Image (cartoon, rainbow, N blue to C red):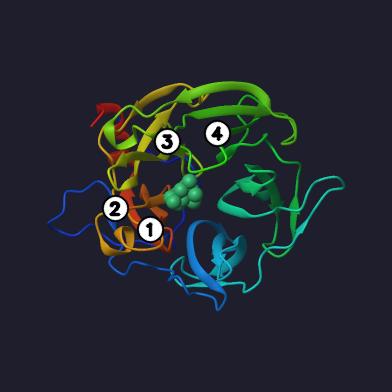
Amino acid sequence: MAEAKLLGAPLPNLPWEDRAFASTEPVWRYSKNPIIKRNAIPTSNSVFNSAVVPFQNRFAGVFRCDNKKREMRLHSGISINGLDWSIDEGPIEWIIPEGVSKPEYGYDPRVAFIEDRFYITWCNGFHGPCIGIGWTQDFQTFYMLENALLPYNRNGVLFPRRINGKFIMLSRPSDNGHTPFGEIFLSQSDDLVHWGQHRWVMRGEMPWESTKIGAGPVPIETTEGWLLFHHGVLTSCNGFVYHFGATLLDIDMPWKVIGRTQSYLLSPQVHDEQVGDVPNVVFPCAALADSATGRIAIYYGGADTVTCLAFCHCAEIVNRCLDHA
Ligand code: BMA
């Protein structure tokens, strides 16, 4: 089979570090993790599970900053190199349509550039967690839309383009607590307001994802299908352990799984992932990809406390999905 290639735009300033010579890992950590510490802004208790995108030859992002009252808030940020971030001290103030409730809280954002603007999806507090959606064009003014799906739901992730004329969103129906179950579903929309034509996508199959799974970064388009990184959770005697793996979805019918990694790609094995406010969590919310080189940089939260970076090659991950490795 031909080597899988990325179909998006080149990104010459993608943050990158080569795999260590002695390593054979498909995903390897940035040697200077964490890239964002818990106290990156004066009010923050922790900055993690955050989403970044290329923006005007630089990078922009929406960050989960839990404050010292332990309120979960979304903040906007900007970076020249994708590594050093300047995060606004105040949370995003949404311009909210008539009749839509102000978010009670917001966490675990994803950002997708579709057509002419950046869409943000996040876990929005609306009588429990549900999927909030909004947009910006400049990372300064943010417009909220109607909540996309009913409570309780988390991990709302948009595809970066329409498929068969429809906007497509993955989500993970849940409960109002620390949900002990979860499978990925897909919904379709003509206008990003009305969602339907729901499809079931996948459940956890392997032990590392046996409790629940959820979509991670915005899916990445490749010649072999959509590459989706997803988190997978197992329940140990000491609580949940969050890993991540990858799945390849059909390009035109993205509810169809072509292949997936049987082994996790990253699990919490180093200090920033094992020690923090919630131990043993790696939680990816964004990935940058350079189609010229096939390189991918994955942004993930470590132990619900800091933001970390890892790297991989598109073709190697796609091969693992197809080989069920
Ligand atoms: C999930 C979400 C994530 C978090 C994870 C581990 O339910 O709340 O934000 O990283 O739990 O605590």
First-in-chain label (3 vs 2): 3
Task: Answer whether labels 3 and 2 touch (C-beta < 8 Å).
Answer: no
Q: CA distance from mark 2 to mark 1?
A: 8 Å
Which residue matches tag 4? 170
Task: Answer whether labels 2 and 1 touch (C-beta < 8 Å).
Answer: yes
Q: CA distance from mark 3 to mark 2?
A: 16 Å
Q: Amino acid at mark 3?
A: Ile
Q: Amino acid at mark 2?
A: Pro
**Which residue corresponds to the image point at 57% horizontal and 40% vertical from the top-left?**
176
Foreground pick, 114 / 325: 325
Q: Amino acid at mark 1?
A: Ala
Residue 155, given in percent of the width and then of the height, sits at 53, 41
Which residue matches tag 1? 303
Q: Secondary structure at mark 3?
A: strand
First-in-chain label (2 vs 4): 4
Which residue matches tag 2? 268
First-in-chain label (2 vs 1): 2
Q: Secondary structure at mark 2?
A: loop
Task: Answer whether labels 1 and 4 touch (C-beta < 8 Å).
Answer: no
Instruction: Tell me: residue 268, above or below residue 232.
Output: below
Residue 106, given in percent of the width and then of the height, sits at 62, 54
Which residue is outermost to the front?
A: 237
Which residue is outermost to the left?
A: 22
Instruction: Tell me: residue 314, above or below residue 86.
Output: above
Q: CA distance from mark 1 to mark 4?
A: 24 Å
Which residue matches tag 3? 213
Query: Is 250 displayed left or right of 148 in the figure?
Result: left
First-in-chain label (3 vs 4): 4
- The tally of labels here is 4
